[in-house]
């Protein structure tokens, strides 16, 4: 066990609910997302980066409802009533958010004609693999990270001022700043109450860690704009 610089790895989680366990884990590794996200919003080249951010998030969010539908169907196969109820409810809350992003991009005169980057495919694709071939509970680790790292409530207004873009082009960003705190609470409430085997707990942890790593890669990719040449910059 490494205790360098006061950190303990892996964090001590014995006796915790799964929700507390995931929170404890993300308290340690989650700050990397704050750092990489902050680099996206630096002033130089911000207008171009905001467009890239919207396109990348569209690539991620377009899969949210289909992933939960897949997970809900896998719950039906395995008799997981409570987990299925959660997915069914959350599907309703996330409907059409990809269309909102497309509309925000359209307002800015941008389209989505280029393919999502391999970084998006890695982030989202891992969940299709785990849900399809292992256990639908894995998706909770992904949701916990995404819902727990929504934009700050003031960000949409600040970006509108800094970019000079119409505030209408920040509708999706603003909506997530408002509602994702509640979505985050809901997924952790579920994790706290859900009976889970040691293997399922591990699967949720691995999914959450993979999502932090994948999202940090994606934020880093966006933060590298503007860069010379190529649709995808790494
Ligand atoms: Fe959403
Ligand atoms: Fe959400």
Image (cartoon, grey):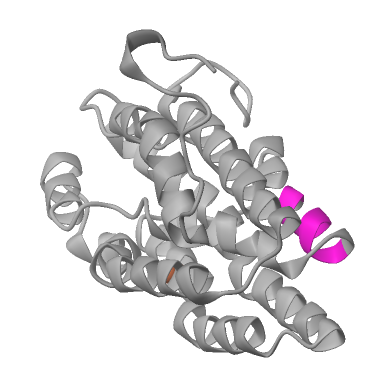
118 displayed left or right of 49: right
Question: What residue is at 28 percent from the left and 52 percent from the top?
Answer: 151
Camera-side residue: 73 or 93? 73
- In this rendering, the answer to whether 148 lies above or below 172 is above
Question: What residue is at 49 percent from the left and 75 percent from the top?
Answer: 193
- In this rendering, the answer to whether 67 lies above or below 32 is below
Q: Quadrant of the N terminus?
A: top right
Q: Quadrant of the C terminus?
A: top right
Q: Give coordinates of residue 56: x percent, y percent.
A: 53, 47
- In this rendering, the answer to whether 162 lies above or below 8 is below
Q: Which residues are magenta?
A: 126-132
**What is the magenta segment's predominant secondary structure?**
helix
Q: Give coordinates of residue 174: x percent, y percent.
A: 25, 64
Q: Give coordinates of residue 221: x percent, y percent.
A: 52, 28
12 displayed left or right of 86: left
Residue 229: quadrant of the picture: top right
Camera-side residue: 197 or 40? 197
Camera-side residue: 152 or 224? 152
> In this view of the protein, can residue 170 be seen by the observer?
yes
Q: Give coordinates of residue 135: x percent, y percent.
A: 78, 65
């Amino acid at each position: 066990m490494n205790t360098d610089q006061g950190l303990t790895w892996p964090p001590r989680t014995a006796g915790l609910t799964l929700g507390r366990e995931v929170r404890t884990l993300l308290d340690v590794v989650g700050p990397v997302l704050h750092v990489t996200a902050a680099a996206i919003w630096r002033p130089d080249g911000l207008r171009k980066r905001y467009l890239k951010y919207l396109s990348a998030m569209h690539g991620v969010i377009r899969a949210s409802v289909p992933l939960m539908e897949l997970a809900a169907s896998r719950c039906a196969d395995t008799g997981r009533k409570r987990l299925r109820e959660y997915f069914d409810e959350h599907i309703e809350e996330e409907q059409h958010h990809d269309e909102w992003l497309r509309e925000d991009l359209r307002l800015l005169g941008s389209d989505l004609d280029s393919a999502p980057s391999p970084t998006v495919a890695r982030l989202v694709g891992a969940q299709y693999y785990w849900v399809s071939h292992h256990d639908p509970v894995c998706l909770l680790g992904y949701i916990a990270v995404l819902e727990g790292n929504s934009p700050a409530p003031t960000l949409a207004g600040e970006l509108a001022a800094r970019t000079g873009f119409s505030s209408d082009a920040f509708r999706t960003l603003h909506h997530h700043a408002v509602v994702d705190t509640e979505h985050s609470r809901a997924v952790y409430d579920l994790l706290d109450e859900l009976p889970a085997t040691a293997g399922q707990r591990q699967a949720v942890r691995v999914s959450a860690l993979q999502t932090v790593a994948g999202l940090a890669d994606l934020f880093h990719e966006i933060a590298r704009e503007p860069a010379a040449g190529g649709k995808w910059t790494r």
